[in-house]
Amino acid sequence: MILPARDKAHLVASRSYLTYGKAELRDKLERNPYSYLHVINPDGQQKIDAKRGTRPFYEWVKKGFDAFQDRGWIEAIESETLAVYRQTSDDHVCTGLVGLMDLAEVESGRLKLHEQTLRSREKLFATYLEEVGCNAEPILCAYPEDNMAASQIAAHLAMITAQRPDLDFSTTDRVRHTVWLLNTKQARKISKAADEIPVMYLADGHHRVASSRELAKQHPEINQQGLMSFAIPESELIIRGYHREMRKLSMTKGDWETLFQSLDAEIICSPLEASASGPAAFGTIHLHTSHGSWKWELRKTNIQDVDAGWLYRQVLEPYFQVADARKDARLHYLAGTESSEALMQRAKKYEDRCIFELHPVTMEQLKLIADAGGTLPPKSTWIEPKLRTGLFIHGF
């Protein structure tokens, strides 16, 4: 396991680079020489003769990674160990284990998946891992708590977190990050308990899992080195809605009313007050447009048929001709961190757009679908906690 140096952890660990706008990313790179963003964006402050997504580009990423190690900004822990990581925000606390999961757990079905992955991205990420030789973003797993193993882990975590942490810092998004590194005896005890958990559910990181499996096929020795994972109790997992925004529409209020009439057998439609909160339960969708907002209540619901799936089949595909929800340039996805009021105001600004506000997929739904070997539609869940890139690194 590789971690940032104690005195630089708050400067090294970064949000996912995808969450930064161009100006913000440039500012971070200019003002913070320790940010792991320099490693994954080698072209941020220098001209390099390599295109993103190619092996020559990944060679530059590898050079940046090696430079961070040479300077002592990130440091390898010599002994095999586990870490306990706690993330604390204004409204949520979660505590779990960071360590290596054997890829055989994926093959055996003990780690339950719920998303389809794109073959092109699997290959791309596998090439990245092969060239760079490290993974700086653990996958996120949730485990059920109705078993003895989970109770034992909870007892271990309580004792460990009562001690002084090895890393403890806050970031500008008002999130506190606390890390305890376990000694060999502690690691063995808690690892033994974790081995007895009957099943785990992958919450975030399906392409990371798929690319690691792809790499293991090419290099069987990698299979023995495991997959870096952050495992938390399922009660501490936050699942938010993931909303749909359709752009480049030419819908009048009359056109919307015609659509409502055509869906009468499927939904109960009623106007939505400006002060309304988000959808109260699955089977309820809020539609926001520049002409007004409405509440749709599905007449028939099935716990294994999430609202995003119904919306695609009954509305997006037949009425807006969205043939592929992953590729249609008109379809955008909005994080579930946005309030209902903010979504209303956003929709009012643009006459050519609408927003479908969705209730979060429940943990029960996710588990039922994963247990049955099914998959959720693309972008069905906005999962938290979000881990910082570069806080935990697995080198192989």
Image (tube, grey):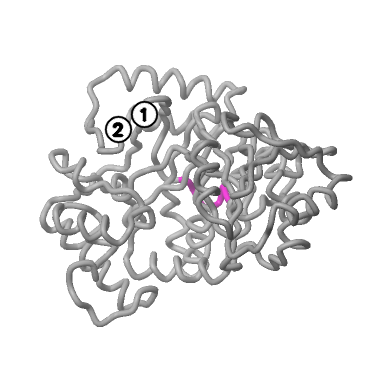
Residue 351 in view in this figure? yes
Q: Residues within 10 Å of mark 2 (few under 14, many from 20)?
A: few
- Residue 58 located left or right of residue 320: left
Query: In x, y percent, where is residue 201?
Result: 58, 40
Residue drawn at (76%, 61%), measured in percent from left and top?
319
Q: In the current view of this chain or complex, which residue is farthest to the right?
A: 265
Instruction: Identify the magenta region.
Output: 101-106
* SS at circle 2: loop
Query: In x, y percent, where is residue 56?
Result: 31, 78
| Residue 50 falls inside the magenta stretch | no
- Residue 358 located left or right of residue 102: right
Of residue 324 and residue 137, the one placed in the foreground of this image is 324
List the residue tagged with mark 2. 174
Residue 383 in view in this figure? no
- Residue 143 located left or right of residue 42: right
Q: CA distance from mark 1 to mark 2?
A: 6 Å
Residue drawn at (42%, 28%), measured in percent from left and top?
94
Of residue 201 and residue 10, the one placed in the foreground of this image is 10
Residue drawn at (41%, 21%), measured in percent from left and top?
156
Q: Residues within 10 Å of mark 1 (few under 14, many from 20)?
A: some
Query: In x, y percent, where is residue 60?
Result: 25, 72
- Residue 127 located left or right of residue 209: left
Query: In x, y percent, where is residue 324?
Result: 66, 66
Report the disc number at residue 13. Answer: none
The answer to whether the residue labelled 1 contacts the one labelled 2, judged by CB atoms less than 8 Å apart, is: yes
Residue drawn at (33%, 22%), measured in percent from left and top?
160
Q: In the current view of this chain or complex, which residue is farthest to the left?
A: 71
List the residue tagged with mark 1. 89
**Amino acid type of the residue that numbered disc 1 sits on in the rendered structure:** Ser
Q: Quadrant of the C terminus?
A: bottom left
